[in-house]
Image (cartoon, rainbow, N blue to C red):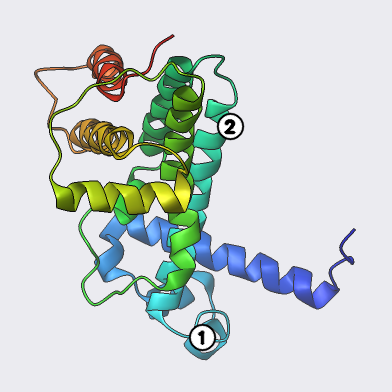
């Protein structure tokens, strides 16, 4: 068991939470590019120098928000996958979890998957959290492949693409053939495209409400990957 936190540690954690909560409100109001430590300090009634003791720069605050958001959507997807009893059911659950989280947190979703924030370079600290969702998705496909239920398919792949997919498989999906990696990435990009279109209002007046279209698209993605069940 970890040692109990001291009163100072608890106070620091509470102030840190207040800062990140205020930052998320600013994301909703002004967008990530306009995130301002001074504005957050004013909202919280702090002097800027005090806030800088928690986050020395805008980029460090952005990084904290990004890591929290990646971990939140990653946890949602991992929990959803655990509820499925077949690879296809797991895929449906994972896709639904991404959409549900995105609808509930549109500004954080935009921070992760929208336009890059000018001047911000994501540090290595974000890689692990950012990997949780794709690792969960590829895990579904790996399990289907190992069980012998992953269907063959897909077009011919170039040597360069094969090498790229082989490297991905070696890192996070050991044993999965390059074609399985490529089909999964195609489906995953389609998933984020469908969610992004819904969040930005691109489906208003056509596939509106978007739920039935999304469910249909998820089934087509499962077919593309080759998931049975």
Cα distance in 3D space between marks 1 and 2: 35 Å
State the SS at label 2: helix
Residue drawn 29% across the image and 47% down it? 165
Q: Nearer the viewer, mark 1 or mark 2?
A: 2
Q: Are marks 1 and 2 in contact (CB under 8 Å)?
A: no
Closest to the observer, 49 or 104 = 104
- Residue beneath disc 2: 79
Q: Residues within 10 Å of mark 1 (few under 14, many from 20)?
A: some
- Residue beneath disc 1: 52
Location of residue 15 with respect to 49 vertically, above or below: above
Sequence-first tag of 1 and 2: 1
State the SS at label 1: loop
| Image-based side of 158 in relation to 5, left or right | left
Residue drawn 30% across the image and 14% down it? 219
Q: Indicate the quadrant containing the C terminus: top left, top right, bottom left or bottom right.
A: top left
Q: Residue 196: x percent and y percent?
A: 23, 38
| Image-based side of 206 in relation to 104, left or right | left
**Residue 170 appears in the picture as rendered:** yes
Q: Indicate the quadrant containing the N terminus: top left, top right, bottom left or bottom right.
A: bottom right
**Residue 69 appears in the picture as rendered:** no
Q: Residues within 10 Å of mark 2 (few under 14, many from 20)?
A: some
Residue drawn 51% across the image and 63% down it? 20
Q: Residue 106: x percent and y percent?
A: 34, 43
| Image-based side of 110 in relation to 101, left or right | left
């Amino acid at each position: 068991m970890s040692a109990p936190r001291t009163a100072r540690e608890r106070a620091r954690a509470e102030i840190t939470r207040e800062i990140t909560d205020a930052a998320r409100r600013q994301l909703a109001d002004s967008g990530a590019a306009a995130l301002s430590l001074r504005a957050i300090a004013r909202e919280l009634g702090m002097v800027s120098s005090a806030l800088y003791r928690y986050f020395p720069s805008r980029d460090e605050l952005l990084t904290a928000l990004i890591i929290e958001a990646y971990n939140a959507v990653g946890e949602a997807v991992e929990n959803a996958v655990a509820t499925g009893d077949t690879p296809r059911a797991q895929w449906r659950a994972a896709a639904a979890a991404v959409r549900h989280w995105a609808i509930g947190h549109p500004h954080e979703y935009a921070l992760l998957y929208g336009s890059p924030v000018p001047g911000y370079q994501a540090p290595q600290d974000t890689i692990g959290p950012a990997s949780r969702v794709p690792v969960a998705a590829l895990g579904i496909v790996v399990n289907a492949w190992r069980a012998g239920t992953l269907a063959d398919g897909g077009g011919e792949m170039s040597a360069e693409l094969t090498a790229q997919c082989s490297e991905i498989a070696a890192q996070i999906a050991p044993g999965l053939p390059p074609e399985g990696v490529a089909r999964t990435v195609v489906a995953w990009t389609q998933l984020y495209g469908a969610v992004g279109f819904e969040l930005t209002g691109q489906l208003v007046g056509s596939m509106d409400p978007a739920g039935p279209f999304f469910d249909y698209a998820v089934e087509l993605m499962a077919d593309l990957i080759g998931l049975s069940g």
